[in-house]
Amino acid sequence: MSWLKQMKGDAYIGYRAIVVHPLKKLVSQDGRTGKQRFLDNYATEGLVPTGDEDQHALLAASRCINCGLCDFHDLVLGTVPRHQYSGMSLFPVAYTRWTSDLARLSKAVHEVTDDALAAGEAVCPTRVPLRILAAYVRRKTGEVAKAMSP
Ligand code: SF4
């Protein structure tokens, strides 16, 4: 009777959406927006919300197959300790996905030049737009710094 289980699950979700949620909103004294509530809960951990404007960059990041070819063009790798920065290949596979690390990376992500990123893009087999991702990460780094400041 898996269909009955499914129906019960759907009915419960519908009940929550149509009855419980609107009633909770009606009696709630909390005037904060969803974004503000998110920031109040998670900003201290370096987590910032993603918006519609972030979708393009995040979709592009998902094309990375983590081959590491672009890292050969990353001159910052030789100048920054690995625990601070591990190469431009981490823009798509890590830095775009987890903003908690951005506070400690802020110096390195600003040092990677557009020329180096362009060279990385040129050898990328899946055409990941590293310059767009670097700009995204730099913008998010600013948002994290702002959210974490008292
Ligand atoms: S070359 Fe492209 S696919 Fe390979 S790690 Fe770099 S961004 Fe990812």
Image: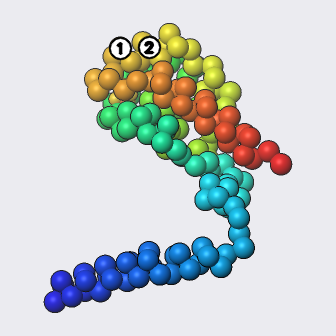
In this figure, which residue is indicated by the disc labeled 1? 122
Who's the residue at 67% across and 39% down the image? 143
Q: Is residue 134 above or below residue 103?
A: above
Give amino acid for label 2. Ala
| Quadrant (top left, top right, bottom left, bottom right) of the N terminus | bottom left
Is any atom of residue 42 visible in this view?
Answer: no
In this figure, which residue is indicated by the disc labeled 2? 118
**Viewer-closest of 110 and 31:** 31
Contact flag, marks 2 and 1 (Cβ < 8 Å): yes
**Viewer-closest of 123 and 72:** 123
Give the colour scheme shown.
rainbow
Who's the residue at 53% across and 75% down the image? 22
Relative image position of residue 63 (x, y in whole percent): 32, 34
Which quarter holds ligand 1?
A: top left
| In the displayed structure image, the side of residue 135 where residue 124 appears, left or right | left
Q: Secondary structure at mark 1?
A: helix
Q: CA distance from mark 2 to mark 1?
A: 6 Å
